Image: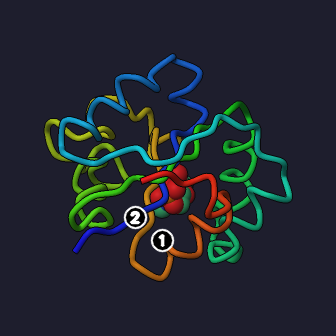
Amino acid sequence: AVERTLSIIKPDATRRNLTGKINAKFEEKGLRIVAQKRIQLSDAQAGAFYAEHKARPFYNDLVSFMTSGPVVVQVLEGENAIAANREIMGATNPANAAEGTIRKEFAESIEANSVHGSDGPEAAAREVAFFFAGTEIVG
Ligand code: CMP
């Protein structure tokens, strides 16, 4: 089925001017960017976005990292977009990411791993709504 998923190009990638190269990976694999904006996350926004990780030891560092520079939030649309995007991104830890994936090519570390993608349909719906009004998404 055609799905939508929330993607974030993280501060390590915007800092190195990799937005276009990362978007090319999505488009080459058949995902369409149906909404996109470059924003600076506040502490409160980043904290709320990653609320499910609040108890994890890396939470505070993650919030600092995600607010350390601009991010590009985007909605990707396509056949099985949620799983397709997870394949295009590669494993969370770039050391485990497959050849040709975004994280293998561009990620600096398990934290500065260049991209975020929703991990399932429920998260996708929640995360898309976190950043975008329906009228901002043009399929
Ligand atoms: P993301 O897919 O955005 O979801 C949670 C983020 O936490 C993850 O990518 C990484 O950027 C970051 N992170 C930092 N350390 C870890 C870790 N040990 N395990 C998982 N995620 C981590």
First reached walking from the N terminus: tag 1 or tag 2? 2
Quadrant for residue 29, please give it: top left
Tell whether circle 1 marks a residue whose Cβ is less than 8 angstroms from ligand 1.
Answer: no
Quadrant, the N terminus: bottom left
Question: Where is mark 2, residue-wise?
Answer: 4
Mark 1 and mark 2 in contact? Answer it, CB < 8 Å: yes
Give the residue type at disc 2: Arg
In the rendered image, residue 10, in percent from the top left (x then y), is placed at: 56, 39
Residue at 26% across, 50% down: 90
Residue at mark 1: 124
Locate residue 133: give its quadrant: bottom right
Establish whether ligand 1 lies closer than 8 Å to the Cβ of label 2.
no
Residues packed near mark 1 inside 10 Å, few (<14), some (14 to 19) or many (20 plus): many
Q: Amino acid at mark 1?
A: Ala
Percent from the top left, x then y, of residue 38?
65, 34
Can you say which quadrant of the picture contains the C terminus? bottom left
- Say left or right for 121 vs 57: left
Q: Which residue lies most toward the left here?
A: 99
**In the depicted view, which residue is nearer to us: 63 or 120?**
120
Q: Give the residue at x 58% y 67%.
A: 127
Residue 28's place in the image compared with 83, above or below, is above
**Label 2, residues with CA under 10 Å away: few <14, some 14-19, many ≥20:** many
* Residue 6 image offset from top left, x and y in percent: 49, 59
Which is more toward the observer, 125 or 22? 125
Disc 1 element: helix
Give coordinates of residue 137: x percent, y percent.
54, 54
Question: 94 or 17, which lies in front?
Answer: 17
Q: Is residue 111 visible?
A: no
The residue depicted at 35 percent of the width and 23 percent of the height is: 21
Label 1 vs label 2, nearer the camera: 2
